Image (cartoon, helix red, strand yellow):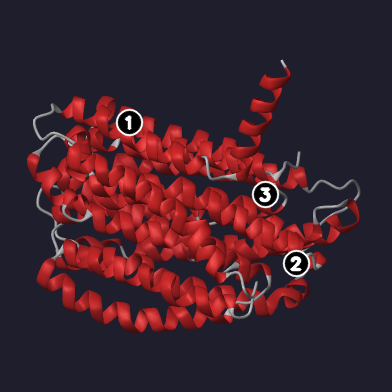
Amino acid sequence: MRTGLNVNIAANLLARGWNALMSFIFVPAYLTFIGAEGYGFISLYTTLVALFALLDFGLSLTANREIARYGAHAEERSKARAMMRTFEAIYWVIALLIGGAIALMADFVVTHWITLHTIPLDQARRGVQLMGLVAVVRWPVSLYVGALQGMQRQVSVNLITSAAATAAGGGAVLVLWLGAPRVDLFVGWQLVIFALQVAALRFAVWRALHLDGDRPRVRFALLRESAGFSLGIMGITLLSLVLTQLDKLLLTRLLSLREFGYYTVAAGIAQLLLNAGSSVETASFPALTAAVQRGEADQESAVYHKASRTLAVLVMPAALTITLFAPELLRLYLSTPEAIAQSGRVLPWLILGNMCLAIMFLPFSLQLAHGWTSLSIWKNVIAVALFVPLLLYLVPRFGTLGAAMAWLSLTLGYLLFEVPVMHARLLRGEKARWYLRDLGVPFAIAASILGIARLLLPASLTPWSAFFAIALAGALAQAACLLLLPEIKGLLRNFRDTSRVR
């Protein structure tokens, strides 16, 4: 069943929040069972999973956009089914190639790339080989998710991914507890869960595209219609791959797995902001695409500003809360002073960097809705040219802090330089509204409330008392920002009018 924008955003938020919670709450258990080095190995696995999600050559986003254009109507469904079958054939072949390459590189990874101290060599080698199998079943997930999102089946996507996240996180803890605290067992459990997940997503896609009497076939000619868009997305994806994962890959080479593990704990917390931002972006992209295709400029502007404002209201209070109160929050989450100190020194930088990146989701979606990919390609080319030397300079000198500083510099550059160029071509005259109204007002309100709370928070509070005070301040900032949304204002106005009538 297709649903509206508000329902899709709500469904995405609930699911992404649950998925993030599943990965978030089990980190202390992983650290307890397999130690910091074992968690560093798991972090290598999660980095590879992130690479699988990005390295899809733009096909998943192309599937999202094309199916959003077709609208999955019966008269267009045969073409959509053929395109889906074509994408599938490409995806599974590449998945096998990627998985085989990772498995073959297992010896090189465990003997030359990472530094092991407590993990047995054979166990680490089996873990990397299993990562190759995970790649096979994990890589096509983005295709099926993109197709379902294009048909605005957000609820189906979120039910499946939430169930998988719950089983992957909770089941892994049980395996490490009841079985043995071994990294290869952890990866093996992930393989089982992701195999079930991709099967469920594939079933949901083909059920949504069902058409009696139609037998879809691979038709590469269909790809020519979206070749320019796909090639542009491919370029953006490959460059984004470098920008989002290079810091982690460099850290696995230059630092110990222990230090890398602490860095990824902070990176995992910062990922929560991207999950919230993605919830709004994935629900808004089909609506933006449809408005652009119909030539409805007013509707396009309305969706863009509404989604941008919603995203800012969701992300900014949370980002500023974690940034300003990182030490107090980490004391409740991590058990050792070393973990708190190592993760806490980079967390504020990563949080602010991801806040900037999340805000950029809607400008990027607007560009893609217009089929305009060249701006992001050139932006990423310039970013890689600046980011790589910056990492190579900062990481050897400052370690994990250097990587976090470089990340914030990169994403802040996106926010300051890409948006003006985009608005010079799309939605002219609305740049100031986006910066000042959609972003500036919620940021100012959240920063004011949380800044005062930071100054007033007594240092003598117990960890739990401090947590409740911080949570109250964060909730006040969030509520104040929510009141900016026209939908919330409308509800309050209707409630007030109803009360007067009574």
Residue 381 x, y percent position in the rendering: 43, 83
**Relative depth, front residue between 29 and 325:** 325
Q: Nearer the viewer, residue 455 or 388?
A: 455
SS at mark 3 in the image:
helix
What residue is shown with label 2? Answer: 297
Q: Which of the image's four quarters has the N terminus?
A: top right
Q: Residues within 10 Å of mark 3 (few under 14, many from 20)?
A: many
Q: Is residue 476 visible?
A: yes
| Label 2 vs 3, first from the N-terminus | 3
Left or right: residue 239 versus residue 396 is: right
Q: Against 342, is 464 above or below? A: above
Residue 141 in sight here: no
Looking at the rendered structure, the secondary structure element under dot 2 is helix
Does 489 sit left or right of 320 as displayed?
right
Residue closest to the far front: 500
The kind of secondary structure element at disc 1 is helix
**Label at residue 326:** none
> Which one is in front in this view, the residue at disc 3 or the one at disc 1?
1
Q: Quadrant of residue 24?
A: top left
* Number of other residues with Cα within 10 Å of mark 1, as a class: few under 14, some 14 to 19, many 20 or more: some
In which quadrant is the C terminus drawn? Answer: top right
- Tell me which numbered mark, 2 or 1, is placed earlier along the sequence: 2
Residue 295 drawn above or below residue 88: below
Mark 2 vs mark 3, foreground winner is: 2
Looking at the rendered structure, the kind of residue marked 3 is Leu
Residue in the image at 63% along x and 60% along y: 304
Amino acid tagged 1 = Leu
**Label 1 belongs to which residue?**
472
Q: Which residue is mark 3?
A: 148
The residue nearer to you, when weighing 258 against 199, is 258
